[in-house]
Image (spheres, rainbow, N blue to C red):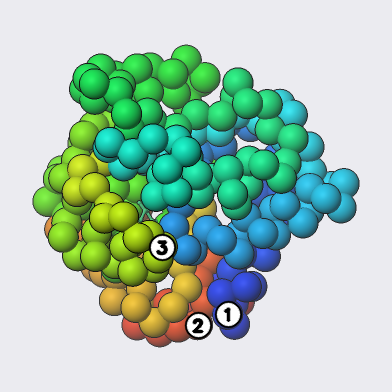
Amino acid sequence: MNVKVVPEAKAVGREAARAVAAFILRHPRTVLGLATGTTMVPFYEDLVRLYREGLLDFSQVTTFNLDEYCGVGADDPRSYHSFMREHLFRWVNLDATRIHLPDGMVEDAGSECERYEAVIDGAGGIDLQVLGIGVNGHIGFNEPHTGLGTITHVTNLDPGTVTRNQRVTGATEPLPHTAISVGVKTIMRARHLLLLAFGRDKAEALSQALEGPITDEVPASVLQLHPDLRVILDQDAAAKLQKTFLS
Ligand code: GLP
């Protein structure tokens, strides 16, 4: 595990964008795992900036997002389809046929999960997966006590997750309580992982995830077992870590 602590949120985004840009420069056909949430906003801002400056070419990159709410269409402002369009896809030269998110509107969500997992496999798996973390230690929408051996599945969201996401996204319509999420096993199969977090409310989750026991009570704790985990945190998010990580 490689942990870097930087002064504040914007620096988390900047460091992460640089790391992803360097990866894509080395591997133009990268299969990139993407995440949503407020943590990703400064990261995508910097990625778009690097693209505009001519440093980045996404034309051969394939993307897979971690999750999507059930019953929310791609044009609904609550959807992660919308989030991704707004913060990344509309600004860069990704090929629309290489962009993938679970479809939250399908009648048979179980088949959609199987299809999504198969498309990831067909692309050769994820090369680099970017991750945020929930205040309860969730990754993707893998909530506590949902097991560490999952692949893409339909999941019930914790009430606390829905309440927080409702607040931070400012969505007026209520958010669904179910979602399709890539599983913990799918995440762990990615060849490289990049975990980002900032803010004091993430400090406890990070302490448990990075330094606590590996348990499905804290799904992110399994990341300790990944052979190539890079973590970028601001000082607030790193506040409860015991080890001193040099920045
Ligand atoms: C959301 C997403 C996760 C994200 C996490 C943190 O519910 N499904 O992929 O990492 O919660 O969200 P935020 O960055 O807004 O704190």
**Mark 1 is on which residue type?**
Glu
Find the distance from the CA under tag 1 to the CA under tag 2. Answer: 7 Å
Which residue is tagged 3? 169
| Ligand 1 sits in quadrant | bottom left
Q: Residue at x 52, y 19 (%)?
A: 123
Point out the image quarter for the C terminus.
Answer: bottom right
| Above or below 170: residue 29 | above
Q: Going by the image, does 213 lie left or right of 234?
A: left
Residue 211: % across, % down: 30, 69
Please tell me whether mark 1 sits on a helix, a strand or a loop.
loop
- Crowd class of label 1 (few under 14; some 14 to 19; many from 20; radius 10 Å): some
Distance CA(mark 1)–CA(mark 3)? 21 Å
- Look at the picture and state if 220 lies above or below 123: below
Residue 177 is labelled as none
**Residue beneath disc 1:** 8
Cβ atoms at labels 1 and 2 below 8 Å apart: yes
Which residue is under mark 2?
235
For the residue with label 3, is its CB less than 8 Å from the closest atom of ligand 1? Answer: yes
Residue at image x 78%, y 53%? 50
Task: Give the x, y percent position of residue 161.
Answer: 24, 61
